[in-house]
Amino acid sequence: MAGKISKNARREGAQDLTSRWGGKIVMKSTFENGKMRHFAVCEKTGHQGRRPKDLM
């Protein structure tokens, strides 16, 4: 079992994602209309997408 990690134990923060504009992609959340809304943001340009894949 040494060195193995379950798929549920992996952390999203461990990944360092970069956008097509060369900036780092971070996930943000806002509370709108009674619901949590998650979105990805490029730190360099400010572009937003629904998921990190949309900015790559």
Image (cartoon, rainbow, N blue to C red):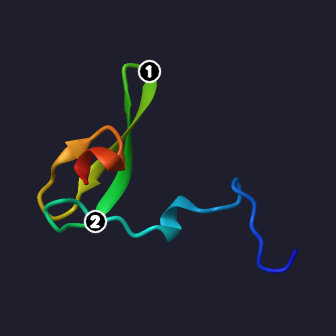
Determine the residue located farthest toward the top in the rendered image.
33
Q: Residue at x 50, y 65 (%)?
A: 13
Q: In the rendered structure, which amino acid carries the disc numbered 2?
A: Thr
Q: Which residue is mark 1?
A: 34
Determine the residue located farthest toward the right in the rendered image.
1
Looking at the figure, which quarter contains the N terminus? bottom right
Q: Residue at x 77, y 72 (%)?
A: 4
Mark 1 nearby-residue class (10 Å; few <14, some 14–19, many ≥20)? few
Residue toward you, 28 or 6: 6
Q: Which residue is mark 2?
A: 18
Q: Quadrant of residue 26?
A: bottom left
Placement of 27 over or under 49, stated as above or below: below
Residue 15 lies left or right of residue 10; in this view the side is left
Q: Residue at x 77, y 79 (%)?
A: 3
Q: In the rendered structure, which amino acid carries the disc numbered 1?
A: Gly
Q: Secondary structure at mark 1?
A: loop
Looking at the figure, which quarter contains the C terminus? bottom left
Placement of 42 over or under 30, stated as above or below: below
Residue toward you, 1 or 26: 1
Distance of label 1 from label 2 (alpha carbons):
31 Å
Q: Position of residue 25 (x, y in %)?
A: 30, 60
